[in-house]
Each structure stands twice: as C-alpha cells, then as structure tokens.
Image (spheres, rainbow, N blue to C red):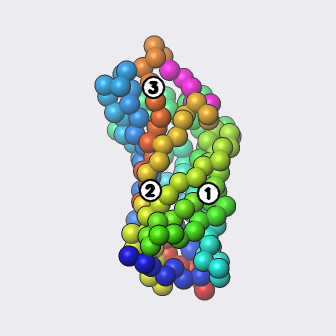
C-alpha cells in the first residue's frame, strides 16, 4: 500500500489513539500490561514529505488495572511523576519508505533523561484528513533511571505499543 500524506499541520486524536506498555515481572512469569489514558501530540508534514512532531504522555494516567501498582509506578522508584509528570517523544525526522513503512528518528525523554530512539511505524491508513501510525518497540528502562528491581523480579526490556491517529488541521 502506498499512501500520499498531505503536507501541513496535524494533531493527535487522543480519543482514537492508544499507547500501551508490557513488561515481564515475577522473574518472567507474569506480564504486566498498562496504558496511558492522557496523550497529546502534534506534527508537521513538510513539502519534501518528511515529518517532525512531538508526543506527550501524562505519567499519572498510566493504568495497569492495579491501583497499588500504579501508585508505585508513579513514585520515585519508577517514573517519579511529582517531578517528571510527562513522557515525551520528539520526532526529529519521519520518512515514508517501502510503501507503508515510516522510519522515525527522535528522542525519548522519561524521568528527565533523554535518549535517542529510532523506530519503524506502519502507516495503516491515510488520506487528506487523517492518518494512523502503528508501532511496537522496546526500551531498556535502566537507561531512564527506572532501575528499581526488588529481589530481581523485573528483568528485560519494556515493550511499547502505539496506535496513533492524527487529523490534519491546516494545509
């Protein structure tokens, strides 16, 4: 599928978008899943077809289905939401390649720590008024100061999944 994406400014449709996380705990026996309920984002598709943009996730909106765990995840042991209320991804470049594959290069900031992040997203639909990007990638939480690990229960990388719906705001 080849999709032509219109130039201009785009806004994340938070009601039609999801960002989730998955991580194995209890020595790899249990997978904890959660999602961010409060998302925001903007982007610009430039005349040359490249794009830039920013996504933010409200840390306090992370819901794993367990209130005690969610409170712990917001604490200084993990996200420290009192001091770092948002997770931000700044896309420095996004280029459509190989039909529906979008190569994205940017910077992920978690807990005030920024690291480069490159990923591939799939453009699942797009027209003059809207587009949807789907992606899945993993991050090493230790790189962002999220190293709390009582009794070695939490190992490996955290998987992030996102389905992001953008609507065009201007041409």
Q: Earlier in the sequence, mark 1 or mark 3?
A: 1
Numbered range of the magenta stretch: 145-149
The majority secondary structure of the magenta stretch comes to loop
The residue that mark 3 highlights is 155
Q: Are marks 1 and 2 in contact (CB under 8 Å)?
A: no
The residue that mark 2 highlights is 135
Looking at the image, which is closer to me, 37 or 41? 41
Looking at the image, which is closer to me, 36 or 113? 113
Q: Earlier in the sequence, mark 1 or mark 2?
A: 1
Q: Residue at x 46, y 66 (%)?
A: 101
Q: Quadrant of the C terminus?
A: bottom right
The residue that mark 1 highlights is 105
Judged by depth in the image, the label closer to the viewer, 1 or 3, is 1
**Number of residues whose C-alpha sits closer than 10 Å to that of mark 1, classed few (under 14), some (14–19) or many (20 or more):** some
Element carrying mark 3: loop
Q: Are marks 3 and 2 in contact (CB under 8 Å)?
A: no
Q: Residue at x 65, y 47 (%)?
A: 116
Spatial CA distance of label 1 from label 3 is: 26 Å
User: Where is residue 64 shown, x and y percent of the image?
Assistant: 38, 39
Query: Residue reaching furthest left?
Result: 29
**Number of residues whose C-alpha sits closer than 10 Å to that of mark 2, classed few (under 14), some (14–19) or many (20 or more):** some
**Number of residues whose C-alpha sits closer than 10 Å to that of mark 3, classed few (under 14), some (14–19) or many (20 or more):** some
Element carrying mark 1: strand
Query: Residue reaching furthest top?
Result: 151
């Amino acid at each position: 599928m080849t999709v032509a994406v219109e130039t201009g400014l785009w806004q994340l449709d938070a009601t039609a978008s999801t960002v989730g996380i998955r991580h194995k705990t209890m020595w790899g026996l249990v997978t904890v899943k959660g999602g961010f309920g409060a998302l925001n984002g903007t982007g610009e598709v430039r005349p040359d077809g490249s794009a830039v943009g920013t996504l933010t996730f409200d840390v306090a909106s992370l819901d794993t289905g367990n209130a005690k765990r969610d409170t712990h995840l917001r604490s200084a042991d993990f996200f420290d939401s009192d001091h770092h209320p948002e997770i931000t991804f700044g896309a420095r470049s996004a280029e459509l390649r190989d039909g529906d594959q979008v190569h994205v290069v940017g910077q992920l900031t978690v807990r005030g720590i920024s690291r480069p992040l490159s990923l591939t997203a799939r453009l699942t639909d797009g027209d003059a008024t809207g587009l949807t990007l789907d992606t899945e990638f993993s991050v090493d939480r230790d790189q962002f100061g999220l190293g709390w690990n009582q009794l070695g229960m939490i190992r490996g990388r955290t998987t992030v999944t996102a389905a992001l719906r953008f609507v065009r705001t201007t041409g």
